[in-house]
Amino acid sequence: MAPTLSLSSVLYAGYPDIHLSVDELLRHVVAAGFRNIEVSAWNQVEDWPLNELVEKCKVAGISIPSVHCTHHYDLDMVGRDYHQKPIGSRDREKVFREFHEEFYKDFEEAGLGGVIVVEHLPTSEKQLDLALRWLSALRDINQKHSFVIVTENMPGPKREEQLRVLRSLLAEEGIYYCHDINHAALAGFDPFDFVEFLPKLRNVHVVGNNPLIRFGDGVPPALGVVPMEGVLRKMIEGGYAGPFTLEIYGFERELAAVLRMSEAALTAVAPKRARQVCAASAGLDWRDVMVIYSRKYLERTLRK
Ligand SMILES: [Zn+2]
C-alpha cells in the first residue's frame, strides 16, 4: 500500500497574518495535488468553520486523517474557555477537561470521528506531571469518542531530557506519538531517535531543518540537513503505516527571499534551466511552489 501523504493547512492558514477561507484553502490543496489534509492552525483548530470544512472536503474528495491542536495545553495562551469566556480564577484543570469534552464532541458531530488528534504538551521534566495528567485526561475523555490521542516532540528541551519525558508519556496506554522531524533536529535528537517510539508512532510531521535557511520553523524536506530519505525509509521498514504530513510553514517575506536567492543562483549557473523553471512556476503562489516541490520529492522518496 502506498504511504499516505497529507498536507498541513498551517502554511495556508497558520500565522496570524495568513487566514484563507475554506474555499481558498481547498483550491490550493487540490492544485498542489494533495488528497489529504491535517487541519491545523496557529491559533485554534476549533476556530475553523468545522461543518463547512468537512462538507467541502467531502465534495472536493479531500480526507482529513489528522487535526493539530497547538495551544490547548497552555490555557494562558488560549485565555478563554470553549465558550470564549475568560478563564479568570476558575480551576484550570477543570476548564481544560470541559474544553476538550466539548471540543471532541463537536469534532465527532462534524463527522471527524476516528481522526488522529495531535495535542502539543510540554516535554520538559519540570512539567512532566502536568503533561501526564492532561494527556491522561484527554485519553479518558476519549473513551466516549474514537479519536487517536497523540503527543508530539517539541523544539525546546534538549535531547536526553525530552527523550526521558517522551518515554514516560508514551508508556501510558492509549497515548500515541507524532514525530516532528524539524523539532527533533532543533532539540539535538539523533535523526533516528524516533525508532524506539515506532510502536506508538501514528503521525509524522515531515519538515526539513536547515540552520542556513531561516524560514519560519522549517524548510521543505529536500532542503534540510536531516537525512530525510533514510529517516522516512526507516519508518516504513519499521512498519509505520500512518500519514506523512508535510508541515512546512513560514513567513511569506522569508520564503520570497529564499525563492529570489534560488532563482538568482540557478540563473547564474544554468540560465536555460532557470528560464524553464521560472516559466513552469509562473503564476503559482509561493506556497504552492514549495508544496508541489515537496510533494514530488516525497512521492519519489517514499516510492523507492
Ligand atoms: Zn509539528
Image: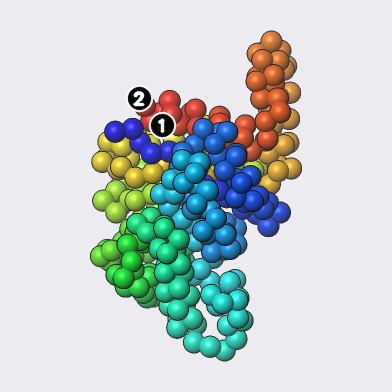
Q: Amino acid at mark 2?
A: Lys
Q: Is residue 199 left or right of residue 83?
A: left
Please identify the residue farthest to the top as the structure is shown: 272
Question: What residue sits right under mark 1 in the picture?
Answer: 229
Image x and y of residue 151, in percent: 40, 60
Mark 1 falls on what kind of element?
A: helix
Q: Amino acid at mark 1?
A: Glu
Question: What residue sits right under mark 2 in the picture?
Answer: 304
Q: Is mark 1 within 8 Å of ligand 1?
A: no
Q: Is residue 95 left or right of residue 170?
A: right
Mark 2 falls on what kind of element?
A: loop
Image x and y of residue 40, in percent: 53, 54
Looking at this view, is 26 or 2 the one in front? Answer: 26
Q: Which residue is located at x 33 percent, y 32 percent?
A: 2
Q: Nearer the viewer, mark 1 or mark 2?
A: 2
Marks 1/2: CA distance? 10 Å
Q: Is mark 2 within 8 Å of ligand 1?
A: no
Looking at this view, is 179 or 123 the one in front? Answer: 179
Looking at this view, is 163 or 1 the one in front? Answer: 1
